[in-house]
Amino acid sequence: MYELLFRHVLSRMDPERAHHLAFSVITAIPKLRLDGVFTRLTKAPVDLSVHTLGRRFPTPFGLAAGFDKDAKGIRGFGALGFGHVEVGTITARAQPGNPRPRLFRLVPDRAVINRMGFNNGGAAAASLRLARVRSLRHERPVIGVNIGKSRVVDVEDAIDDYLQSARALAPMADYLVVNVSSPNTPGLRGLQEIDKLAPLLSAVKAEARATPLLVKIAPDLSDDEVRAIAALAVELGLDGIIATNTTLSREGLKTDAAVVEAAGAGGLSGAPLASRALEVLRIIRSVVPRELCVISVGGVDTAYDVDQRLLAGATLVQGYTAFLYRGPFWARQINLGLARLRTTRTPEL
């Protein structure tokens, strides 16, 4: 049903407009007091829970940062079956992001190119919304908060900018993420260099205090760079790593080259990222101890994909782009599929 709607209606609509339309429907779920109904529909028949970062995650599958930029849809996404919702990327200062158009579908690849540019209402406004969600007695998913550098702030002043966001948002987060890997903010990816990353993470960790801290990295790093950041995370006592963000690569796409070129600059997400995201996951897991939380994101579409990431060492798995292609009950499909895999897999002897 949804695929017919996507093929004949949504795929012809401006991608950002379609996103806002879908988001308005999702945020309406708790407003109409339908969250209890949806939660019963999306709950898996077996226990899928994962204990990590000092929290119980009802399912290992969650929503990656980028969809809920301003922490406005947390309860709705939880009702749809996501065990955790990572909001953001949120910056210390409110900013409109890059000029439109800035979101493009590559339908033959089940992929998206975006150059949104951290459009959000700022850390102070998001903190108030998060406080309201946390004050409610309703069941909610685990809340991750992803923070990035404000565009108007020079890279040399990035630490103070991140600290301002951490100060406002860490108390409202179940876990906090330092995003240094988006390709859409000038100079941001340069913060992944160890000599710049170490003081940034140390400062944010001190500011975050008891809130678990993770760092999100790019898939375009070399294998050695991935190993170096993984080792740094362990050295600094971080609680986890998220791998990966979007890629600048355009290799191996099925979409007509002219369409890809017309889309222009931005990060590519979706199915083409799956292979590299899995590689990076395995590299990280070979370096870090078992107890470190590793969240794998990039190219997951089905319950089998999620299961393969878990078997490869992921603690949790996130998705985003396939949500646009699979529709509102995607997380439910993942959870039910994981439940079937758990009940049919032959135990190891």
Image (cartoon, grey):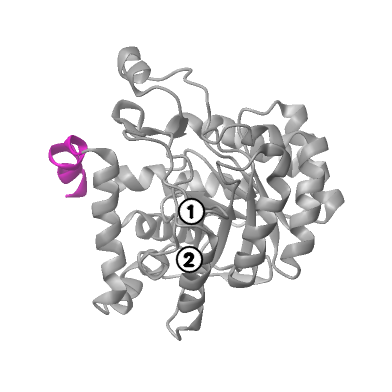
Residue at position x 72%, y 64% from top? 208
Circle 2 packing at 10 Å, graded few (<14), some (14-19), many (20+), is some
Q: Which residue is mark 1?
A: 94
Q: Earlier in the sequence, mark 2 or mark 1?
A: 1
Looking at the rendered structure, the secondary structure element under dot 1 is loop
Q: Is residue 319 left or right of residue 108?
A: right
Q: Which residues are magenta?
A: 1-13
Q: Is residue 139 left or right of residue 10?
A: right
Helix, strand or loop for the magenta stretch, by majority: helix
**Residue 326 at what x, y percent from top left?**
30, 47
Residue at position x 58%, y 55% from top? 92
Asked if labels 1 and 2 touch by Cβ distance under 8 angstroms, the answer is yes
**Residue 306 at what x, y percent from top left?**
50, 48
Residue 2 circle label: none
Farthest-out residue, bottom:
137
Disc 2 versus disc 1: distance between alpha carbons? 9 Å
Give the vertical position of 194 relative to 79 (above or below).
Answer: above
Give the vertical position of 231 relative to 47 (above or below).
Answer: above
Give the vertical position of 239 relative to 288 (above or below).
Answer: below
Circle 1 packing at 10 Å, graded few (<14), some (14-19), many (20+), is some
Give the camera-side residue of 308 and 78: 78
> In the rendered image, which quarter contains the C terminus?
bottom right
Farthest-out residue, top:
258
